Amino acid sequence: MSEPLHNSSPPEAEQAAKRKHDPYKALRYRNFRFLFIGMLLASIGDSMLNVAVGWEIYERTGSELALGFVGLAMIMPVFLFTLPAGQLADQGRRKAIVLIALSVHFIAVGALGLCSYANTSIVLIYGCLVVMGTAVAFNNPASSALMSQMVPEEAFESAATWSSSAWQLASVLGPGCGGLLIAVAHSALPIYIINTLAVLINICLISLTRPAPRKVSEKKERPSLRSLGEGVRFLRQTPVMLAAITLDLFAVLLGGATTLMPVFAKDILQVGPSGLGWLQAAPSVGALCVTFIIAHRPFKKAGRALLLAVAGFGLVTIVFGLSRSFWLSLLMLFLLGGLDCVSVVIRSTLLLARTPDEMRGRVSAVNELFISASNQLGGFESGAAAQYLGPVPAVVFGGIGTMIVVGIVSLVWPEIRKLGTLRPNEEALTEASEEEHERLMNA
């Protein structure tokens, strides 16, 4: 099978090399294009929705505690159902699970719109948010695992990169568009309508995809508490992936720059709401720029890149904490987002490329659980540290802690330092995926 490749003429070899390093590889597959467009629209809609719900709750109650319950209503189902959802994604039809979860999400957003229009009890709004959180808990592991059926293995890194770009672009556009719509309409209702349409389009696009059939495992695993925890056991036995997730977990947990941005904008940099808007947009803009760089220049020494990125994340966090210049702070947040993007792409690609297909749902579920926990606990840790130490020491010590964690991880899991390309046995996989490449291109 490999002989024709070795004996190919220079133009053919050049063409093969181009395909191998194609920065838009994943986007050339019809399935992934539908998935990407749907993901982008839904992410923008969700970013706008977050603004709308926060604004409406605070407008109607004037209570900071009521705002806190918004996050609690969304995150509780994620903690409760993510692991069972991962098991379901490994044993059921992933596309069907995603479509059902999105349909529930669609109904919940529509109900939010009705609650807003009818000015119903706040309790009903929280109920809708709990239903949305439940839909997210079941959707995320299944959609992460489904991506591996949308592109061949040689396009996993490209798929992870462009998926990250969709979320980052939504983070830039969504809050601004949401705030503008509320300012114009003096109501959150238009945002609920737009988000409902975005979820509906996402459902339609995913319905049109034709995922590659999954490889059937010889040993059919029955649902059990043991199989539920297989994702955790697999990560414990895979040092490279465990190291990548640990780095990301502690970077988010200790790096409190984004959580404390309102404090820095008002009290330290004294730039007001408009300056806060720029500061909040900077990380996503930085991540978006780095996404395009990664797409064109794939990682050759991914382990070293990951360690340097997370160490750099800690360093720019320290500089941000000490800065009294708005422009320097803006630059540091831009770099912060870019370095975080490196970590996200490497971790996402490792999850796709190095997890057996029959375990992708459960491993993705553990990853989602780590991300959710680090985001929520990181915000709490930053707020608590700022309360007792002050915002500047809280951010600076968080950056120092992140750099210490990088050193510990590189010593505990030396395999991460030696990690080269993100796909195992890349040369062998290039040949093996030729047939899959042709089949998916024609899907």
Image (tube, rainbow, N blue to C red):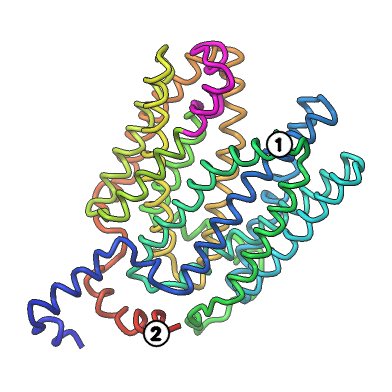
User: With 104 as the anchor, is 254 left or right in this view?
Assistant: left
Q: Are marks 2 and 1 in contact (CB under 8 Å)?
A: no
Q: Residue at x 47, y 29 (%)?
A: 255
In which quadrant of the rendered view does residue 439 lie?
bottom left
- Tell which of 389 and 192 is nearer to you: 192
| Left or right position of 188 against 401 | right
The circle on residue 439 is 2
Residue 339, percent across and down? 36, 39
Give the residue at mark 1.
184
* Looking at the image, residue 159 lies above or below residue 90: above
Most frequent secondary structure within the magenta stretch: helix
Q: Which residues are magenta?
A: 256-281
- Quadrant of the snapshot with the C terminus: bottom left
Q: What is the three-letter code of the residue carrying label 2?
A: Arg
Does residue 14 appear to the left or right of 370 in the view shown? left
| Horizontal and vertical percent position of residue 35 | 52, 66
Residue 144 x %, y %: 52, 62
Q: Amino acid at mark 1?
A: Val
Q: Quadrant of residue 319?
A: top left
Specify whether residue 230 is in view: no
Q: Determine if residue 42 is in view.
A: yes
Task: Give coordinates of residue 280: x percent, y percent.
Answer: 52, 31
Q: Residue at x 26, y 58 (%)?
A: 421
Vertical side of 10 occupied by 27: above or below: above
Label 1: how many Cα within 10 Å (few below 14, some 14–19, many 20+): few
Q: Is residue 260 magenta?
A: yes
Report helix, strand or loop for mark 2.
helix
Looking at the picture, does residue 289 appear above or below residue 88? above
Foreground residue among 23 and 231: 23
